[in-house]
Image (cartoon, rainbow, N blue to C red):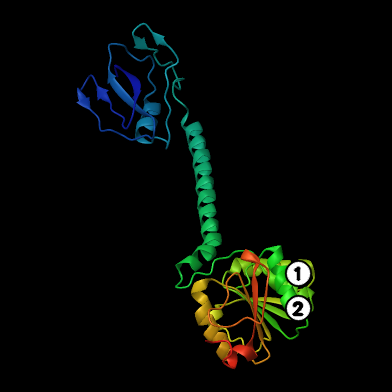
Amino acid sequence: GNCFFTLIPFGLFHRDTAFGQRGRPVRLGPAEILFLPSPFRFHHWDQPFFHQLSCSPPPLVHVRASRTLGTHLATLEEGRPPECVPPASLEASSLKKSSWGALFTGIVGGTLVAVYAVATPFITPALRRICLPFVPATTKQIENVVKMLQCRSGPLVDIGSGDGRIVIAAAKEGFTAVGYELNPWLVWYSRYRAWREGVQASARFYISDLWKVTFSQYSNVVIFGVPQMMAPLEEKLELELQDDARVIACRFPFPHWTPAQVTGEGIDTVWAYDARAFRGGGGRP
């Protein structure tokens, strides 16, 4: 036909000058083609190629003009038009870009899932009625806890064991120590640390809610608590512990018990309570 072409977004329009009819827009992808009436005639127009281009367009089409002649675009030569990308090349390019897009989507999706899986156990405690966040024990706090355990024996439990520092330190002092922690990532990391330190036989860690555990079998209890949980935990331990048990509180004291010993200062302060004293009534006002 008598026509020339140029690039516009979102549609393929064809106008046959002989019949004066406008064709339906055909979407070809991000780059589209507009055919318009022109006084210039294409030389040796390849009708089969036009049929392939218009009726079976590849997913992505790029059409360009190599040069202009005066006021009109260069005419197409005989055979395959040099201004058009071959359909086979377009198909390969489209598949390559689709593969990269799928890879990128997979990486982004996998990253989001991984971040969600790792972050959720750390965020969930903040949504509980009593929030017990993970705050690692300082070296001085660990030293003060070990000091309070001198001349003690029997099994030890760390309530809310975090990354396992207290349990591992107690195991190195000869205790059979157990840590209960709600965060599975911290439990697995604690097990790894115990293995690396060579105390995996005497330092064990479990994923559990402290309110669902019975502590009657432990002679030594360590807790890094928060003010909101100390009163209800005080009642729970008073009911469950044996008379020879010792409770060691770090960062915050129990509200009603009278400590047998206190060591450290500021955030490193540690309070030691003997079960025989608070169970006999001497610990409550």
Q: Seen from this angle, which residue lies furthest left? A: 20
What's the residue type where badge 2 is placed?
Ser
Residue 199 found in image quarter: bottom right
Quadrant including the N terminus: top left
Q: How many marks?
A: 2
Task: Locate residue 30, reporting x and y percent.
Answer: 39, 33
Crowd tier of the residue under label 1, counting other residues whose Cα lies within 10 Å: few below 14, some 14–19, many 20 or above: some
Above/below status of 215 relative to 163: below
The mark that comes first in sequence, 2 or 1, is 1
What's the residue type where badge 1 is placed?
Trp
Label 2 residue SS: loop
Q: In this rendering, which labeled residue sits more in front, label 2 or label 1?
A: 2
Residue receiving disc 2 = 202
* Residue at image point 44% right, 24% down: 84
* Residue at image point 73% right, 69% down: 143
- Disc number at residue 195? 1
Label 1 residue SS: helix
Residue 40 found in image quarter: top left
